[in-house]
Every structure is written in structure tokens, then in C-alpha cells.
């Protein structure tokens, strides 16, 4: 299987589609991931891989096919398509010792893409803010 596109300074965050069971839902998830967000109008850009060759990939296969310099990738998989909230899988593909993954609501992907890309926040901050089911739904107010 061919590797995902490699990283370069002009690349956006990588978004890989691994479930092809519902094209309409895929387009809806992608639209939400791209924004604009309702509260501030932010948008996100992804280098999108929409290729049937990657159907059903497991986490280890994703690690094998991704350049570790990408840092993290977004994956629309079977869970994304079948779960009622359609959480996108966020996989940290960096150095083996630092690998982790979690899920986020599609609308939260905009925040992750924007803030991690610009260095405002680290991916770990989103991971640490996931709910007990491992889904990031937004940062909770501390008031």
C-alpha cells in the first residue's frame, strides 16, 4: 500500500477517509471539519486523502503509512460514520514514545487544526481535555 502524502512546509493537516459507506455523511463531516465555526468564523484546511485503497485501515497501518513529521492526522473511519456524534479520530503519529490518539467532534477539528498548526496549543492539551469516553467536545469553562 502506498504511503500517505509526505509532509512539506506548505502541507495542511492530513485528513484520511477510511470508511466509504456513506458519501453524504462523509461530506457533512468534512464540511463541519472545515468550518467556518459559528462563534468566530474560523476555517480549517486539510490535505484530504479520499482513496478506497485506504478503506478499513487499523491504527498500526496508519502509523506505517504516515510520515512521523506530520505530527498528527485526522481520520474519518467507521466509528466516525456510525457513532451518533460522528467523532473524528485524531492520531498522533510522531515519535513512537509519544504516540496517542483520541476523538473529537467534527466542529472541534477546526480548533485543533488552527491551534496546533500555529503553535497556540499542543495536541496533548486537547487529549487531556477529552471526556471520559475519549472524545474532545470542547474545553470546559473553569468558572
Image (cartoon, rainbow, N blue to C red):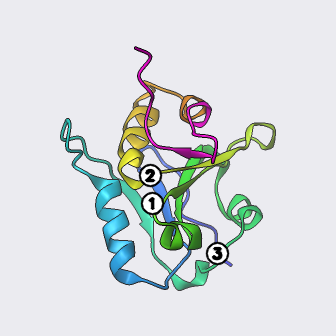
Label whose residue precedes the other's in the sequence (3 or 1):
3
**Circle 1/circle 2 CB separation < 8 Å:** yes
Of 86 and 26, the residue lying toward us: 86
CA distance separating discs 3 and 1: 31 Å
Label whose residue precedes the other's in the sequence (1 or 2):
1
Residue at the right extreme? 97
Of 108 and 8, the residue lying toward us: 108
Percent across and percent down for residue 21 are 49, 85
CA distance separating discs 1 and 2: 7 Å
Q: Secondary structure at mark 1?
A: loop
Label whose residue precedes the other's in the sequence (3 or 2):
3
Circle 3 packing at 10 Å, graded few (<14), some (14-19), many (20+), is few
Give the quarter of the figure containing the N terminus. bottom right
| Span colored in magenta | 127-143
Position of residue 116 in the picture relative to residue 24 (left or right) = right
Give the quarter of the figure containing the C terminus. top left
CA distance separating discs 3 and 2: 29 Å
Dot 3 corresponds to which residue? 2
Q: Secondary structure at mark 3?
A: loop
Dot 2 corresponds to which residue? 105
Q: Secondary structure at mark 2?
A: loop
Amino acid at each position: 500500500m502506498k504511503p500517505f502524502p509526505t509532509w512539506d512546509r506548505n502541507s495542511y493537516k492530513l485528513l484520511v477517509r477510511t470508511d466509504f459507506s456513506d458519501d453524504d455523511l462523509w461530506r457533512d463531516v468534512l464540511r463541519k471539519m472545515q468550518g467556518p465555526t459559528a462563534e468566530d468564523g474560523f476555517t480549517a484546511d486539510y490535505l484530504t486523502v479520499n482513496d478506497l485503497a485506504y478503506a478499513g485501515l487499523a491504527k498500526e497501518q496508519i502509523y506505517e503509512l504516515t510520515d512521523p513529521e506530520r505530527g498528527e492526522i485526522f481520520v474519518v473511519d467507521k466509528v466516525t460514520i456510525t457513532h451518533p456524534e460522528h467523532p473524528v479520530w485524531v492520531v498522533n503519529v510522531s515519535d513512537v514514545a509519544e504516540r496517542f490518539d483520541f476523538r473529537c467532534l467534527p466542529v472541534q477539528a477546526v480548533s485543533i487544526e488552527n491551534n496546533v498548526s500555529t503553535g497556540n496549543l499542543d495536541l496533548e492539551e486537547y487529549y487531556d481535555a477529552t471526556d471520559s469516553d475519549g472524545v474532545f467536545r470542547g474545553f470546559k469553562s473553569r468558572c
